[in-house]
Amino acid sequence: MTISDHRSNRAAHSSPADLDGPRIPLYVPEFAVDPHRIYRAMREQYGSLVPVEVAPGVPATLVISYYTALRIFNDPDHFPADPRTWQRDIPADCPVLPLMQWRPNARRNDGTVHTRYRQAIVAGLAEVDPFGLHETVEKVAVPLINSFCGDGSADLIRQYAFPLTFAVLNAMLGCPTEIAQRAAAGLAAMFEGVGAESGAAALMKALLELVELKRAEPGDDVTTRMMRHPSALTEPEIMNQVGTLYGAGIEPLQNLIINALRLILTDEQFGDSAVGGSLSTRDALDEVLFNDPPVANFCFTFPKQPILIDDVWLPAHQPVIISMAACNTDPVIGTDQHAGNRAHLAFGGGPHVCPASSLAYLIAQDAIDQLLDALPDIRLGVPAGELTWRTGAFQRALTALPVVFPPSPPLTPV
């Protein structure tokens, strides 16, 4: 796929109609192979705003300028998060609808409604003890490592990153494994756009069971704290706030861990040995959050009326999507020094910025450090060029991360 294949003629001052021409599909396998090449071509051809499709026949505008993204993040009056007018014309079986449609949660609302939901989430997360979370990651990581450390090889997604993030998030939310397994499967279907409608139904059914369980058996967990918050959330509202945390806490966190491990295992600046590089795990996480954020294109907004931005008229009620991956690599911000740099947009921005970013950093760093401390001679199991990426408009996710290492004795359980 090339940009010229999807070229549209634009005057210096475009109108909404000008964005109705050919669009660049984000859902095709070619995009997943090398999105940064596509972003560079987009920037050369279109500037800051790009006509795209997020699914066949579903148009959107992709924002690839860092400062334009900041403007949109911080202007919810003109760029609200509520998609209800847009979704009226979207078929029920559209693969991206379950991920983009309105729900009674903080992500899809603005103003006082958003504040009410967000306050409950923030309060639920505020009492998560960082030291206790560190112990939880260690307790989960050690038996996972022990399950494959004697084999000399592993797939770090299937055998480590996914089960670790799954178990740690369940501990934070107070969710039993059986309920969580169905929630995670539903979320994966929604992110990939394959069986998304049934995936969304499975997710909501699992979350309802969790809320009913916590009502009968409250605990010291995020779900119980949100249920007890003075905002007095209704049952559907509680389900949807928990769903938001699952959406942010399983797929994206798993892929943050894996993308950082891929970088550590393939990039010279991190050293030939996984533990002997010149940069730290935190540096690797920052590098990934700039260059390969696990959620690459997200943060949907839906202008209420046509609006002029960067000399382009954006249509009313059509999705405007922030490309965190493209914005972070916008040449205008002019830095390749990402170590210690937190200016990336990987966690969003403005009123909807992710409230759990510090916890995500902590879990990802601990998970990586546990693995590298246990298996310091770990190596990529295939040439880096043979790694493959999952197709999807929104994520940056490997299909597998095979590694090899000298077989090692099991660690002492925590």
Image (spheres, helix red, strand yellow):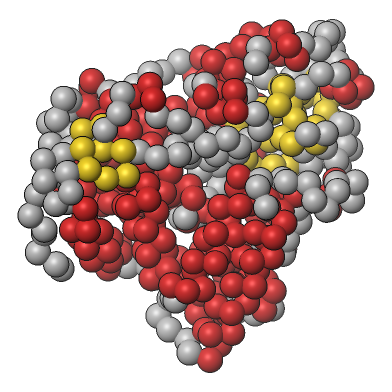
Return the x and y of residue 232 as percentages of the image width and height.
65, 79
Name the residue at 52% across, 37% down: 390
Q: Is residue 283 left or right of residue 215?
A: left
Return the x and y of residue 338 as percentages of the image width and height.
35, 27
Return the x and y of residue 374 as percentages of the image width and height.
13, 49
Instruction: For the C terminus, give its image quadrant.
Output: bottom left
Judging depth in this view, the residue of 262 and 132 nearest the camera is: 262
Return the x and y of residue 380 as percentages of the image width and height.
26, 32
Q: Is residue 347 left or right of residue 381?
A: right
Whether residue 131 can be seen here: no
Name the residue at 9% across, 64% down: 412
Q: Does 179 sit above or below residue 65?
A: below
Q: Does 49 sit above or below residue 306?
A: above
Instruction: For the N terminus, give its image quadrant.
Output: top right
Judging depth in this view, the residue of 198 and 109 nearest the camera is: 198
Which residue, as the protein is rendered here, is positioned at the far front? 151
Which quadrant of the structure image shows residue 307? top right
Q: Does 268 sit above or below residue 174?
A: above
Name the residue at 56% across, 52% down: 188
Which residue, as the protein is rendered here, is positioned at the far bottom? 216
